[in-house]
Image (tube, grey):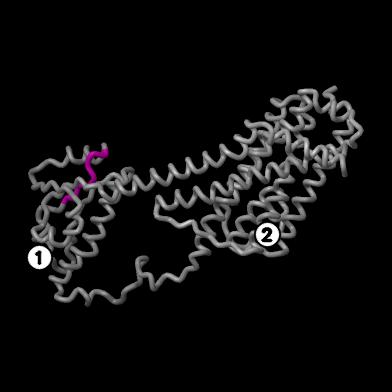
C-alpha cells in the first residue's frame, strides 16, 4: 500500500511541478472552450442580426393594383423594383443567382382579368417566384412573401369573389406560435438537446487527456530510462502499476472536469447567440450517476492506453497505436448522437465506451434505470480490471519493460 502511495505521489508531482503540463491540462482547455463557443455565439448572433436588418432586393413584374395593401408588411423591409410586361427579367435573375438580389415575382399580364372573370373549370392564374435557396436572405424573402401571398392576398381575393371567405374554411388548427397548444417540459427539452452533445464531448475529451498523459507516464519513462530505475527499487511492481493507473485516472478526471466546467460556461453563450437555452437542473442522484460513470470510464481509458503504452517501445510508437483507439472512441460517441431514441437492447449497455455515452445521455434526460446503470458501471469496471491485469503482467516481464 505504501508503494502505491509513493508512485501515486510521484506521478502527481511530475504533472503539477511542470508548468507546461498544468497549462495544457487545466488552463488551455478553459481558454479554448470559452473562446471557441463564445466566438460561435457571437458570430451566430451577428448573422441573425444581419438577416433581421437586411433589406430584401425584390422585383415584381405585372403587379396587380391591390397587391401593395395586402403585402404591406413585406414591402416595408424590401426595396422593390416594379417591372412591366415589356421589361426583361434576365438581369434580375442573374442577380439572384450571384446573391446580389433576393427575389423575383412574376404575375401574369392578365392576372386581374382572370381573377375577376373566373368561372368554375377555368385554369387558375399562376404566379412565378424565383429565388436562390442557397442564400439565406433570398430564402427568407421567399418564405416571407409566399406566406403573405397565400395567407393574406389570396384570401382577400377569395373574399371578393364569394363575399365571405369564412365560408371556404371548415375548421382551423393551432399553429406553432400558439403557446396554449404547446405542452412541453422545458427542462426535459433542454436535457434532450444536451444529451446529444455532452456525452460525445465528455467521452472524447476524456480520452484526449488520457492519450498524452498515459503514453508519457509509461512509454515516456521507458524511453527516458527512468522506468528501469523505478523497477529495480524495492517497491512491488503491482504497486507501481496501481499507483500509476490511479494517478492517471485522477489526472484524467481533473482534466475532464475542467473541460466540462468550461463547456457549462461556454455552451450557454453559444446558444444565446442563436436564441436558444441550455439551462439544466440536475438532482443529486443524477450528479452521482454522472460522477460514477465518468470515474469508471476514465479508469477504462487509462487501462486501455496503458496496455498500448506498456508494449510500445517509444512515445511515437505508442501514439501511433493509440490513434486508432481514439477514432473508435469518436465513432462510438457519434453513434449515440445519431442513434434513434426509445427502447434500447440490453446488449447496448454492455458495449465498452458506447454504453457510457448512452448512460450519460439517459442520465441527463432522467431515463437511465438503476439496472442499466449497474450494467454500464459493472461492465466498464470488469474490462478495465482485465486490462489492468494485462498491464501488471507486462510489468513483470523484463523483455517488455526493458524493450529487449
Q: Is residue 397 left or right of residue 279?
A: right
Residue ID at (34%, 45%): 47
Q: From this viewpoint, which residue is outermost toward the right?
A: 234
Q: Can residue 102 be found in the magenta stretch?
A: yes
Residue 361 percent across, percent down from the top left: 60, 56
Is residue 307 at all visible to an observer of this figure? no
Residue ID at (10%, 65%): 116
Q: Is residue 200 left or right of residue 110?
A: right
Q: Can residue 63 be found in the magenta stretch?
A: no
Residue 355 percent across, percent down from the top left: 68, 52
Residue 344 percent across, percent down from the top left: 65, 60
Mark 1: few, some, or many residues within 10 Å (few <14, many ≥20)? few
Q: How many labels were placed on the picture?
A: 2
Disc 2 marks which residue?
A: 288
Instruction: Give the magenta part as a residue range.
Output: 99-106
Split into 4 quadrants, where in the image is the C terminus? top right
> Label 1 to label 2, Cα distance in Å?
72 Å
Q: Is residue 372 above or below residue 170?
A: above
SS for tag 1?
helix
Disc 1 marks which residue?
A: 116
Residue ID at (17%, 50%): 106
Q: Quadrant of residue 224?
A: top right
Mark with earlier residue (1, 2): 1
Residue 232 percent across, percent down from the top left: 89, 28
Residue ID at (65%, 56%): 290
Circle number at residue 184: none
Is residue 152 at all visible to an observer of this figure? yes
Q: Is residue 234 above or below residue 126?
A: above
In front: 351, or 89? 351
Split into 4 quadrants, where in the image is the N terminus? top right
In front: 301, or 145? 301
Amino acid at each position: 500500500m505504501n508503494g502505491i502511495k509513493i508512485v501515486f505521489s510521484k506521478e502527481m508531482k511530475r504533472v503539477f511541478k511542470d508548468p507546461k503540463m498544468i497549462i495544457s491540462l487545466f488552463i488551455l482547455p478553459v481558454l479554448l472552450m470559452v473562446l471557441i463557443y463564445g466566438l460561435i455565439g457571437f458570430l451566430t448572433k451577428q448573422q441573425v442580426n444581419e438577416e433581421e436588418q437586411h433589406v430584401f432586393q425584390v422585383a415584381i413584374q405585372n403587379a396587380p393594383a391591390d397587391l401593395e395593401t395586402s403585402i404591406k408588411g413585406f414591402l416595408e423591409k424590401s426595396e422593390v423594383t416594379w417591372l412591366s410586361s415589356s421589361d426583361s427579367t434576365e438581369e434580375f435573375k442573374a442577380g439572384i443567382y450571384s446573391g446580389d438580389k433576393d427575389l423575383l415575382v412574376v404575375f401574369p399580364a392578365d392576372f386581374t382579368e382572370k381573377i375577376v372573370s373566373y368561372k368554375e373549370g377555368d385554369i387558375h392564374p399562376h404566379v412565378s417566384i424565383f429565388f436562390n435557396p442557397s442564400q439565406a436572405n433570398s430564402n427568407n424573402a421567399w418564405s416571407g412573401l409566399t406566406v403573405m401571398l397565400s395567407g393574406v392576398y389570396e384570401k382577400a381575393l377569395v373574399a371578393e369573389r364569394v363575399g365571405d371567405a369564412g365560408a371556404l374554411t371548415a375548421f382551423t388548427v393551432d399553429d406553432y406560435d400558439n403557446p396554449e397548444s404547446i405542452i412541453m417540459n422545458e427542462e426535459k427539452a433542454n436535457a434532450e438537446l444536451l444529451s446529444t452533445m455532452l456525452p460525445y464531448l465528455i467521452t472524447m475529451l476524456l480520452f484526449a487527456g488520457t492519450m498524452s498523459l498515459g503514453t508519457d507516464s509509461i512509454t515516456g519513462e521507458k524511453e527516458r530510462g527512468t522506468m528501469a530505475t523505478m523497477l529495480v527499487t524495492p517497491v512491488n511492481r503491482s504497486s507501481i502499476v496501481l499507483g500509476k493507473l490511479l494517478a492517471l485516472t485522477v489526472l484524467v478526471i481533473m482534466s475532464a472536469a475542467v473541460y466540462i466546467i468550461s463547456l457549462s460556461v461556454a455552451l450557454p453563450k453559444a446558444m444565446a447567440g442563436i436564441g436558444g437555452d441550455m439551462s439544466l437542473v440536475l438532482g443529486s442522484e443524477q450528479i452521482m450517476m454522472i460522477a460514477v460513470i465518468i470515474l469508471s470510464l476514465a479508469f477504462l481509458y487509462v487501462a486501455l492506453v496503458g496496455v498500448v503504452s506498456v508494449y510500445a517501445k517509444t512515445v511515437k510508437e505508442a501514439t501511433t497505436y493509440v490513434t486508432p483507439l481514439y477514432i473508435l472512441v469518436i465513432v462510438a460517441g457519434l453513434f449515440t448522437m445519431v442513434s434513434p431514441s426509445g427502447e434500447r437492447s440490453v446488449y447496448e449497455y454492455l458495449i465498452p465506451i458506447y454504453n457510457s455515452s448512452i448512460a450519460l445521455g439517459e442520465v441527463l434526460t432522467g431515463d437511465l434505470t438503476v439496472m442499466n446503470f449497474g450494467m454500464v458501471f459493472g461492465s466498464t469496471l470488469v474490462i478495465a480490471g482485465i486490462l489492468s491485469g494485462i498491464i501488471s503482467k507486462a510489468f513483470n516481464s523484463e523483455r517488455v519493460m526493458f524493450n529487449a
